[in-house]
Image (tube, grey):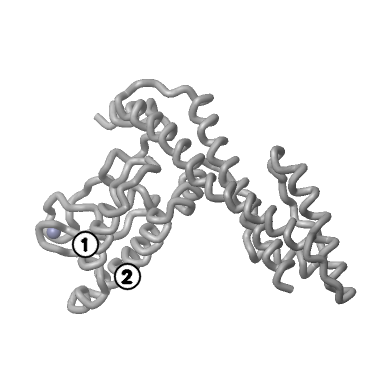
Amino acid sequence: MPQTQDKSAKDSGILVVSRGKPAQANCWSCGAMRAAHFCQQCGKVQPPAPVDYFTFFGLPYKLNLETGRLEREFYDLSRHLHPDINAIKSDREQSWALEQSSHLNDAYRTLKDPILRTEYLLRLQGVQLEEQSKAATEEARRTGTLKKQVVPPDLLEEVFELNMQLEEMRMNKKMGESDRTLERQIEDARKQLEGKYDGMMQDLSAAWSEWDALVERAERGESVLDDDRLAVRDKMVEVLNRRNYLRNLLRDIDEALES
Ligand SMILES: [Zn+2]
């Protein structure tokens, strides 16, 4: 019996792991078929299953997500899993409720944010994104090492010039001089980069739709070429790296302008 199920799960590949509901099981207490996190029959909290955030919410691996629905689901589950509500329950249930609650909070925080959601899906797809966080930047500065950053090719020239200007301005400030023309040039460059940063969300959203279309194909049982999947995946990685790069650059400019 499980063989046919295993096969269909395998055929649909990495795209369709979650079909809308986490694996069903019977309630440990009353034996009724239960919801994933608590029993619909007797209300008892169920032992947590090690599932990813999409599966936790019973969602397919799609990136266009109705955040309103997610929010309602979150509050509904929060109520059921809240430690106060579970105070009169057994120790075992209480610790399950706590564990489920914290998983729920992590899952919600990650999935409601478009960037975190994309990064999370990419991680599920085995992608390690470049570490370009503020912490990494500061650490690199502190230790004097050069942080590994890939400059998006179409920005190379712009960034090269901008870095020269920033360097010049830092020198000026060190000497107690100011160059209004230079400052204005840098502010202009900043405005342009900001526009590009804002355009990023559109690129990302276009990639989401391509991705979701692949998931839908897999859901219909149609085959999806690995190359197609990887192409969309890589597109998202590129957009996110570009976004991180621009974000850091904008921060560098602001720091230079303010100092
Ligand atoms: Zn039950």
Structural crowding at the residue carrying mark 1, measured as other residues with C-alpha within 10 Å and reported as few (<14), some (14–19) or many (≥20): few
- Residue 110 versus residue 89: which sits nearer the camera? 110
Cα distance in 3D space between marks 1 and 2: 15 Å
Give the residue type at disc 1. Asp
Give the residue type at disc 2. Leu
Camera-side mark, 1 or 2: 1
Structural crowding at the residue carrying mark 2, measured as other residues with C-alpha within 10 Å and reported as few (<14), some (14–19) or many (≥20): some
Q: Is residue 41 left or right of residue 241?
A: left
Residue that extends furthest to the right in the rendered view of this protein:
175
**Residue 246 image point, x, y percent:** 64, 52
Distance from mark 2 CB to nearest ligand 1 atom below 8 Å? no
Q: Which residue occupies 30% across, 66% down? A: 96
**Residue 123 image point, x, y percent:** 52, 46
What is the secondary structure assignment of the residue under circle 1?
helix
Quadrant housing the C terminus: bottom right
- Residue 94 versus residue 29: which sits nearer the camera? 94
In this picture, is 22 found above or below 30?
A: above
Q: Is residue 33 left or right of residue 257?
A: left
Q: Which residue occupies 37% across, 42% down? A: 64
Q: Which residue is mark 2?
A: 98
- Residue 98 versus residue 219: which sits nearer the camera? 219
- Residue 3 versus residue 225: which sits nearer the camera? 225
In this picture, is 55 found above or below 90?
A: above
Q: Earlier in the sequence, mark 1 or mark 2?
A: 1
Distance from mark 1 CB to nearest ligand 1 atom below 8 Å? no
**Residue 137 image point, x, y percent:** 70, 62
Q: Quadrant of ligand 1?
A: bottom left
**Residue 221 image point, x, y percent:** 32, 23
Q: Which residue is mark 1?
A: 76
Quadrant housing the N terminus: top left
In this picture, is 167 found above or below 193?
A: below
